[in-house]
Amino acid sequence: MIDVMLLVLFMIGLGGILVCVGVFLIPIGGAPAAMSTATGVATGCEMITMGAGVTGLFLAAAFYTKSLMFVIITAGVSSALMLAITMLFTNLIVIFGKGVPPAFATKERDPITGDPIKPYVTPGTVGHGVPTAPYLGGVLGSFLAGAGGALAFTAMYRFSSGATLAEFVGVLPQPAPQVAAMALSVITAVGLYLINANIAAYSIRGVIESWLDPKFSKLPRVIAACFSASILFGVLILLVSIGGVG
Amino acid sequence: MGHVTKGAPKKPTINPKYLAIIGVAVGLPGVYLGKFSPLIPAALAVPALVWAADAIRRIAGYGLGTGVPSIGNLAIGMGVLTALVGLRYEPALGVALAALWGIMYGVIIGRLKILEIPVFTRCITELSVGASVGLMALLSAAAGGYTVDFFQGRLMPMIFLTGFVVAVFWATSMTIFHPFNACLGPGEKQTRTLKLAVGVAGIDVTLAGISALGVAGLNPSIMTLEAAVGIIFLGAAVWIGGYYAFIKAAIKESASVMWTGFPEAKK
Amino acid sequence: MEFLTAAIVLGVFAFIVSLGAIIGWFEDLESDTGSQSNPNSQVQLAPQMGVRHRIYNKAISGEPISNGLWGATAGTVFTVLWYSFQVHPLIALAVASSFTTLVHISLAVSSHLGRTASVNIFKQPLYLDVVTSHLPLIASHGFIVSTALVALAYIFYNVFFSLEGLLGYPMPIPFLSFLLGIMAGAVGSSTGDIHYGAERQFQHFPFGEGVPSKNFGQITTKAEVGWRTSIDVTYFCAKYGGPMAGFCYALILLVDNLRLLIGNFTVILLSLITGLIILAALIGFNRYLEVWARKKFGPYA
């Protein structure tokens, strides 16, 4: 029992760290991006992290019996696909709806493709759309955020249905899903997103240009905060579901 | 994603200390009194929610760098599991845990210099407790009042299996942050914001009543149809009353009110 | 695998994707009718810059949160009627969406009145005809969104238990509609809103450049004829921003359900590989689009 509880705490802590790193990697433009004044996805940190993260929860719920590693990676890929499609459509609307090419002003050249990128920026703005370097950062970030949420979801679901350590990391032998535990797990995963995405959002003041941003250096301190907050959250998870919830 | 004005909030008309005392002193006994009638916790959840909405007002006045809703969501994220712990073991334990966890979150966020707001730890604790008490009261009202074996016997099979919990969960978050978010601006006034908070809390109570109606349909032995309809009517009355007072205040305090017209030309 | 089961699975799959298109499309237009989410900051700032307007200021919350609430509310009312009282699903759906519309209208009214009253020191008048003329449009778009959300959740839930997990997800209906609503809001606010915020809201500035921060608050207040209201915004965004948001949401559901089907029919590893291939294709297409746009538009001059 103790080993499973420690594993749950570890998974929740890891999930918190993954969500936090995910927020730092997703290019978030906030309100200025909706006016093509800044690079990134045109919505708030918590909004896009939750939007991408909950997409992963669907497949994590559908594949609830599969082995832990597969569930987490599949959910992460789901979230990455969601954000990749969203950023592509962001670019389509910026290009055809506003008539500006994707660009950013923090660097002279795109660090991945090496294209000169600064001349395309409108003076008085810091960029538009999602160019390749932040795009790749966003795909990786949403993968991590989705995997983090799926970790919390799976940890809560398997712990509340009383899985042993081998069932926890391997295949869960359950003939039919426990819908009530599924609901509790979704609330847990959403709670984990709400706490960690907001802590990360406050530290970057709501706007970040993926890994190109100077604010990225704040990451270690925020990871420490998210890890401790998630461990606190994990203790509550143990208290709620110890001994099964059915 | 609103435009947030910087600087400390103006001097409030109603002292937040009174709101805090009323919120806890009324909300927590409400959870226990649920065994007499589920109408009691439904009615007594409103002061706790109004108190949490006032705490948002004090914290978000400083400028968070992102939208006001984020702090309400942080509150509900902290409050939901403490509320469930409270309903599983002992509601008073839930409130104590919510306070303790709120302080710890505040210290973590403050010490690691994530957000440097002077009243942050205090406000985040109030938010955590307010959200937790509000959720406990509403969930216990929806499942027929807090009794022994409430969590396993009533909450999981009636509220979680059917999924009714999510409406109360999310509407509580909306109740906490919407009043300040909707009244944001340089002319924001505490009385107007709190009138709206009462109105939105009415929506929350109505949703708890609808969940109670669903529970009554599934298992009449733990929730009577009359009590469920009573909660819905109570919620609707609070909803309409709060909105009536708010709309009157907003119309009175606007710069000018007209049925139609054009703004005067730009200077 | 019988032919009939395969045909039903494919039919349901197509229906899921088409409902997704409706959700994304109408969600975005609903948020444009009243400038919710990010473009709202400019509507809020405008009176401070001396620009008074007749635009609806619907600052309920961020779109994912508000749409999550519509989904959760409608899903709960639907489940109460359908599961607890065995009402026919179609009737339950209509009642649930109607009740959600009441909640939606209440919050929409309070945000416009509250925000207008709070900018009273900048002499922004409160026009009651703006409120009354916009509410039907907001309510009708919101009604379609909540109907489609709950219908989709109902399909997911029932298909999971009747097709032995080939499609759909084992979550309660309110949870499914809640999560779908959050996704819809995230998609709508990060794609469709750019068409409103960057183009329609600043239409008197030249097309083909981003909005410099010195122009913030200087929103367009005149319409093609007369003063602009948010209804004119919806009319414009219905031509590009709204459909694109719907297309985006439908594509997300298509890819996600396709991977679910592949994982269920074959092995889960293949669904993972499919996902990675689609991801690579998306990255490649985005790169092509970026290069094409830079070549076509040229540097800023």
Image (cartoon, coloured by chain):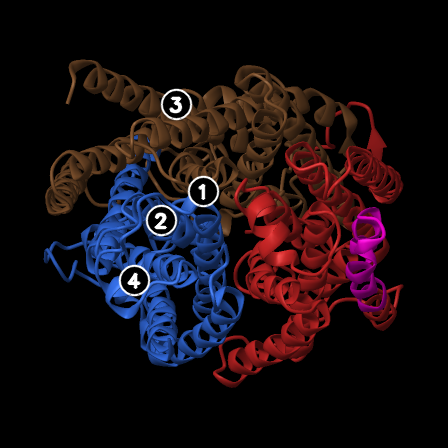
Using the image, name the chain to which the residue with label 2 belongs.
Answer: A
- Which percent across, then down, holds residue A192? 45, 62
Report the residue at 61% width, 30% height from top: C84
Letter of the chain in blue: A
- Which percent across, then down, holds residue B208? 70, 43
Residue under label 3, please give it: C19
Q: Residues within 10 Å of mark 2 (few under 14, many from 20)?
A: many
Point out the frontmost of discs 2 and 3.
2
Q: Is residue A15 visible?
A: yes
Letter of the chain in red: B
Q: Is residue A44 visible?
A: no
N-terminal of the pair, mark 4 or mark 2, is: 4
Residue under label 4, please give it: A25
- Which percent across, then down, holds residue C300? 26, 45
Q: Residues within 10 Å of mark 1 (few under 14, many from 20)?
A: many
Q: CA distance from mark 2 to mark 1?
A: 9 Å
